[in-house]
Image (cartoon, grey):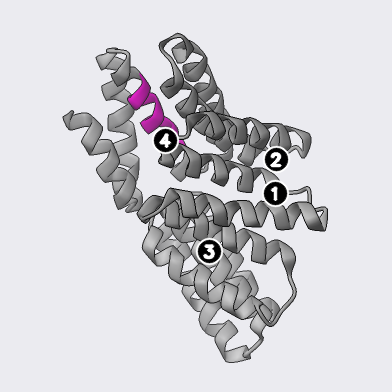
Amino acid sequence: IIYPTFFSISGFSLAHLGRFKEGMPHCVYGLEEAMESKNLFTISLCRFNFGMSLLLRGAWNEAKDYFINCLKGLEQVEFVQIKAMAKSGLGIAEAFTNDPIHGRTLVEEGLNAFQDAGIIMQVSILQCFAGMCCYLSGDLEDALLFMNKSLESAIKNDESYFKGNAMIWRGRITGNLSDSSQKEAQQQILKGLEILTELDTKPDISLAHLFLGELYTRNNQQKKAINHLKEAQTLFKKMGMDYWLKETRKIMSS
């Protein structure tokens, strides 16, 4: 049981660093070993880590399959935290591929499960997911509300990684709210980028550069915009993050 889980977590950890070519085979091997064990909890945990790794890469459709199968396995195993996070992972994947409103519903179900169980740690990432769903649906007010909650939770629980993510997404949302909030948006993204750079989580660092590129493009600061967009493009291409690479190139060609 421990052996496949170790490989699965190792793969997820490598994905956080943007080392997908190394990490994904660990996820594959861990899941294969878990399937051999026939232990439903281990299989579900490995599927969850696989799905989360794919989310980091922006491989939304692939991630969906792993979360759906993870949740099916957890129907027979009581593990509130993983079940809630898998449902939220499915929600964010759904939001990026099809329906952000339905995605938000799934994420909020996960959040409610955390609340009912009294789980405090890692709630920040679910609040961040909810904010992302709201952003994708065009509900910027609720998006900002969730990101504020995500940031507060991350600070309270001393979760630097979640804090950095909440800050870059909060900055992205803030920058879209009004012309008067551009400086605040820039400061938020830059601070988040600083935190994430210290952690060396390259997929998130790349997003921060993309968000700065968006912001500077909107404010007609073309030199700054192109510098950050080129950096994002280089990193996304190197890591095989095709969805985000396409999003970056759309802005560069606009």
Query: If you read the primary sequence from the N terminus, does the residue marked by circle 2 or circle 4 appear first?
Result: 4
x then y, percent, for residue 160: 66, 37
**Closer mark to the observer between disc 1 and disc 4:** 4
Quadrant (top left/top right/bottom left/bottom right) for the C terminus: top left
x then y, percent, for residue 82: 67, 64
CA gap between label 2 and label 1 equals 8 Å
Q: Nearer the viewer, residue 80 or 236?
A: 80
Residue furthest out toward the right: 118
Task: Tell me which residue sits at (53%, 49%) in the image.
Answer: 104
Q: Which residue is mark 2?
A: 159
Q: Which residues are magenta?
A: 205-215
Q: Nearer the viewer, residue 2 or 186?
A: 186
Instruction: Give the amino acid at mark 4.
Output: Gly
Task: Tell me which residue sits at (61%, 31%) in the image.
Answer: 145
Q: Which residue is mark 4?
A: 138
* Relative to 119, 180 lies left or right: left
CA gap between label 1 and label 4 equals 25 Å
Query: If you read the primary sequence from the N terminus, does the residue marked by circle 2 or circle 1 appear first?
Result: 1
Q: Quadrant of residue 166?
A: top right
Q: Which mark is residue 122?
A: 1
x then y, percent, for residue 17: 50, 49
Q: Is residue 208 magenta?
A: yes
**Closer mark to the observer between disc 2 and disc 4:** 4
Q: Which residue is mark 3?
A: 11
**Closer mark to the observer between disc 1 and disc 3:** 1
Disc 1, SS:
loop
